[in-house]
Amino acid sequence: LPDQEQVEDHSGPAEVVAHAVHHLIQCAPPGQKALWVGDRVETDILGAAQLGIRSALVRTGEFNESDLDGEIRPDFVFDSVQELLSLF
């Protein structure tokens, strides 16, 4: 996980979380998969894409239907978090 110096180098909490997740994924056993779940295309889904992680957009909270019109595309789109269970 990031140490204090690495945390201070980032501009916001989302970058700290992304850095920590990236570190954890690199340490995961082979074959283990990750899915980044969020309701914001410009932050959650973009961040997942930048880290090479598959993403699921949930149509709740900050989601706006026009978010799906841009170039940033999630791997999955769900109406609720409950629907994520269909992946397992």
Image (cartoon, helix red, strand yellow):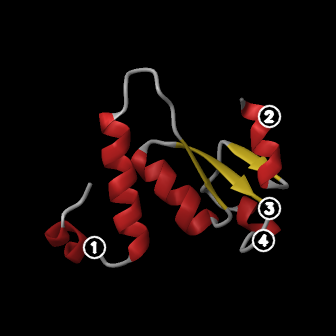
Of the image marks 3 and 2, the number of the one nearer the N terminus? 3
Q: CA distance from mark 4 to mark 1?
A: 27 Å
Question: Is 80 situated above or below 84?
Answer: below
Location of mark 1 (residue): 10
Separation of disc 2 and disc 4 at Cα? 23 Å
| Mark 1 residue element | loop
Depth check: give the residue in front, 19 or 51. Answer: 19
Residue designated by label 2: 86
Q: Which mark is residue 64?
A: 4
Q: Residue at x 37, y 32 (%)?
A: 28
Identify which amino acid the numbered label 1 is placed on: His
Q: Estimate how packed mark 2 is, as few (under 14), some (14 to 19) or many (20 or more) residues with alpha carbons within 10 Å.
A: few
Instruction: Find the distance from the CA under tag 1 to the CA under tag 3.
Output: 28 Å
Q: Residue at x 41, y 48 (%)?
A: 51
x then y, percent, for residue 80? 82, 55
Amino acid type at circle 2 is Ser
Viewer-nearest of discs 2 and 4 = 2
| Cα–Cα gap, marks 2 and 1 | 35 Å
